[in-house]
Image (cartoon, helix red, strand yellow):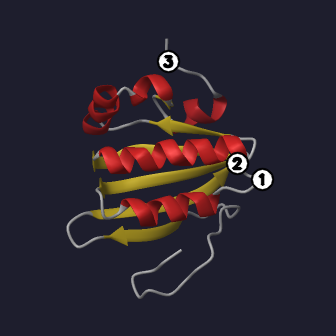
Amino acid sequence: MITQAGARIRPRAFDRRPVTYPVSDGFHALKLSSRSENGYVVAALAGELGLACAPTLREQLFGLLRTTSSQLVVDLSALTYADANGLAVLVGTGRRAVLLGGFLRLAAPSPTVAKALRFTGLDRQLRIFPTVQAAITGQESA
């Protein structure tokens, strides 16, 4: 993982305290924080997910996935913008999780991101839940 100073740090996916990784391209500001909850890795995104942030976010999300912790929930409630490149990161992360024997679940997308997911058809491809807790328990809304 990369900090603002450019130093490499190791993610603490199994720690109960959230860990925040800033990702910025100068135009879009994005934060990723992660924590472990009930055997799931919960990653929360905040800010804007644009083209220039996508490669770094992909690296960081892939870094959270392990064969022993490949059940990933991504909280999208604080994400205000996502373009096609950012959404592609989520698709790729989901594929990686499946290869490791797990899954990706999206939780609480903001209205803007939910619209982008519907527009691209990814709402039919990815599992989306109304809350992080619903994603953890696997209870989809009726």
The residue that appears at 65% across and 45% down in the rendered structure is 97
- Image x and y of residue 113, in percent: 30, 38
Q: Amino acid at mark 2?
A: Ser
User: Viewer-proximal residue, 134 or 123?
Assistant: 123
Q: Which mark lies nearer to you, 2 or 3?
A: 2
- Image x and y of residue 15, in percent: 68, 64
Q: Which mark lies nearer to you, 1 or 3?
A: 1
The residue that appears at 54% across and 21% down in the rendered structure is 140
For label 1, the crowd category at 10 Å Cα-Cα, with few meaning under 14, some 14 to 19 and many 20 or more, is: few
- Image x and y of residue 20, in percent: 48, 68
Identity of the residue furthest to the left in this view: 27
Give me the disc on residue 70. Answer: 2
Chain-order first, disc 2 or disc 3: 2
Q: Amino acid at mark 3?
A: Ser
User: Viewer-proximal residue, 125 or 37?
Assistant: 125
Q: Secondary structure at mark 3?
A: loop
Q: Which residue is mark 3?
A: 141
Q: What is the C-alpha distance between the residues marked 2 and 3?
A: 23 Å
For label 2, the crowd category at 10 Å Cα-Cα, with few meaning under 14, some 14 to 19 and many 20 or more, is: many
Q: Is residue 13 left or right of residue 107?
A: right
Identity of the residue furthest to the right in this view: 68
Q: What is the C-alpha distance between the residues marked 1 and 3?
A: 29 Å
Q: Secondary structure at mark 1?
A: loop
Give me the disc on residue 67. Answer: 1
- Image x and y of residue 24, in percent: 32, 70
For label 3, the crowd category at 10 Å Cα-Cα, with few meaning under 14, some 14 to 19 and many 20 or more, is: few
Tag 2 near tag 3, CB within 8 Å: no
